[in-house]
Image: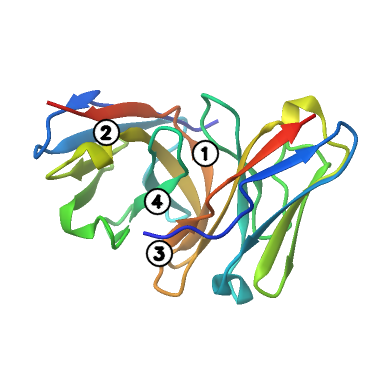
Amino acid sequence: QVQLQESGPGLVKPSQTLSLTCTVSGDSINSGNYYWSWIRQPPGKGLEWIGNIYYSGSTNYNPSLKSRLTISIDTSKNQFSLKLSSVTAADTAVYYCARAVRITVNRGFFQHWGQGTLVSVSS
Amino acid sequence: SYELPQPPSVSVSPGETARITCSGDAFLNRHAHWYQQRPGQAPVLVIYKDTERPSGIPERFSGSRSGTIVTLTISGVQAEDEADYFCQTTDSGDTWVFGGGTKVTVL
């Protein structure tokens, strides 16, 4: 059974860069059947898709975050990562990594989720 | 970013049927997927590709689609079904989008 675990700082200062890593166990990240995804949820609010990365390194980002966002993949470590720059309090959220089943190009659904990690943006 | 419209809340007595809708033009030619999120937990996939149920999800969960509206139905609701439910799809610009979420309360 695949498992995903988020890691990274729980507190980031405004204007700095939020960095998280997702470590995948129980399956290889080097598969054409899946996208590797980031989703976030502000406290008390709904889910927001951040972006996906394919094993080849191709990415698909939420247009509202694209200018500040970088998602990368390291198949040798079975990890993928998120960097979100110029953060503000509005970026405070629980950040989830997930494995998405690829239905076709840029379409799919989130099959497995990490437990999530709360990142607060505050000075 | 935007959210697909869902009713904010649905209340149902144990054993009754809960229906949660989600609407959007994307559903004319794209699949709907549904997630259950209990308080303090990560979301769990309960329906994918409109009507498919992952292994381990009870048969009382079902999905349907009609035009631009998709529906998650929970038949014979149990206390453990009290949770938030989110729909999800991909829009015409390849943006993956969620519904705003529906809180199901079991009376």
What residue would you read off at disc 4?
A49
Whole-angstrom CA distance, mark 4 to mark 2, is 16 Å
Q: Secondary structure at mark 1?
A: strand
Question: Looking at this view, is A102 or B8 the one in front?
Answer: B8
Of the residues under marks 2 and 1, which one precedes in the sequence?
2
Color scheme of the displayed model: rainbow
Of the residues under marks 4 and 2, which one precedes in the sequence?
2
Q: Nearer the viewer, mark 1 or mark 4?
A: 4
Chain of the residue under label 1: A
> Is residue A102 at all visible to an observer of this figure?
no
What residue would you read off at disc 2?
A21
Of the residues under marks 1 and 4, which one precedes in the sequence?
4
Residue type, numbered disc 2: Thr
Q: Are marks 1 and 4 in contact (CB under 8 Å)?
A: no
Chain of the residue under label 4: A
User: Looking at the picture, how far across and down is residue A40, in whole percent?
Assistant: 38, 41
Q: Secondary structure at mark 3?
A: loop
What residue would you read off at disc 1?
A112
Packing grade of label 4 (10 A; few <14, some 14-19, many >=20) is many
Whole-angstrom CA distance, mark 3 to mark 1, is 19 Å
Residue B54 sits above or below residue A61 on the image: above
Q: Residue at left 89%, top 39%?
A: B16
Whole-angstrom CA distance, mark 1 to mark 4, is 14 Å
- Residue B97 disc label: none
Chain of the residue under label 2: A
As drawn, is B64 to the left or to the right of B44?
right
Q: Residue at left 12%, top 26%?
A: A123
